[in-house]
Amino acid sequence: MESMLAINKLTIFNELKGQSCFKKLGRLLQLVKGGPEIKKNQAYYSFVNALLEENAYITYSVGSPWQNYILEKILTSDNLFTRQGETQAEISPIIEMAVREDLRQLEILYHIDWADIEKQLFGNSLDHSIFNFQNTPVSEASTIFPEKYHEEKRMLKELMNKNQDWNNLLPDIIGFFKKWGTGEFAQYWVFKYNGDCLEGIDKPDPIRLQQLVGWNVQRSQIVDNTRQFVKGYTANNILLYGDRGTGKSSTVKGLVYDFGEMGLRLIDVSLKGLVKLPYLLRKLSEKPQRFIIFIDDLSFEEYETQYKELKAVLEGGVEVQPSNVLIYATSNRRHLVKEKFADKDMNFYFVDNDEVRMQDSLQEKLSLSDRFGMTIYFTSPAQREYLEIVRTLARERGIKMEEKMLDRMALQWELMQNSRSGRTAKQFIDHLAGRLAMEQREF
């Protein structure tokens, strides 16, 4: 059968053969020409189930579910061809020849006559076929981040769906990889890493830098450093420390919205993930994108030793930090490793501690924060600054209230929460907006 031969001929896209849909399709095609009825039915529905599972995570469907699956795999695969398209000015002639042949085979698979296969399997008894559904959006593309990437991928899918010879579109396909990259780093701009796996986040925190109020001087330093970095110039690792609720984490998370199209990716690394940080850095060093390793709320108890891994990465390890990776960490502490008063007591005879060189131990703890090239302090706002944040957020949310009343309620909220910060201001506005909306609706 031509379709079975097409699967076997794949070279550059050879990895597709090992994926569930292709394996189940191969099994189905083998049974169609001759096999027990029950096994043919099982193979068909097993394939359909695998296909629906795959399409459930695709933002926009073009063609039938099978056709959409083929297009998605071409545009998201991470292989020798797509990596060359991503990083090199030209595809090598031998790779181009192989990928052109692969595109011909994938077109054969794209145009499988499912009506004929289903007739051989079921006669005329099959009332509904998933292969008759065309151009069915399976989720709202506007809700999936990054929106522009998914929109351009949809447009290229539609172009391929209408074109009878995909080899004519090879420059368009290569251009897509060159602009957006390949694999997971094209599909996602924000990730989580726990030391075991790198997980893409399709709906990250939507906070934008433009939405953040206050701390403009601190934020501009971070933005300038990041812009320098994504443009390919040297830049510094940054420690953002200071009072809680001042927008340290939001500032870092907001960077990807401003610089994602320039190749910036954000990876949230847990304390557990720090132990295997060198493995992650090796992987990232091979990619053309620029990466910020984001470590939120960074601090260590005395007995925790992960900070030594971070120290080695920042400066002093045998493996240098890749030029396409920076580390941005937030903390409420200026010195990231917990100290005790005993650490500062130089009268060794009267301290209940068996450390002989306590000053050496203290210096080791302090040296972690010193290894960040930039240290930026976020302090709690004064009352005037706090009220200005509240007024700005109220205007953005469309809350119309006399300024004196708004200020008085905001100060009462601050007293109840025993905290004055940007976070407190946002929480107050969330509360107020919800209450006003409820009162208006119920009235």
Image (cartoon, rainbow, N blue to C red):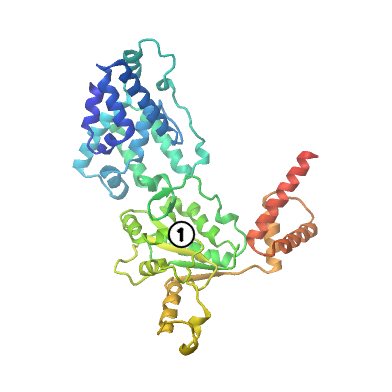
**6 relative to 412 in the view: left or right:** left
Q: List the single residue furthest toward the left.
A: 94
Q: Residue at x 65, y 67 (%)?
A: 381
Q: Badge 1, how many Cα within 10 Å: few under 14, some, many 20+?
A: many
Q: Quadrant of the C terminus?
A: top right
Q: Is residue 107 above or below residue 413?
A: above
Which residue occupies the foreground of this view, 9 or 340? 340
Q: Nearer the viewer, residue 107 or 276?
A: 276
State whether residue 4 is above or below residue 211: above
Q: Quadrant of residue 326?
A: bottom left
Q: Position of residue 327 (x, y in %)?
A: 42, 63
Residue 108 visible: no
Would you identify the image quadrant in which residue 441 lies? top right
Location of residue 406 (image quadrant): bottom right
In the rendered image, residue 247, in percent from the top left (x then y), is placed at: 58, 61
- The residue indicated by pointer 1 is 294
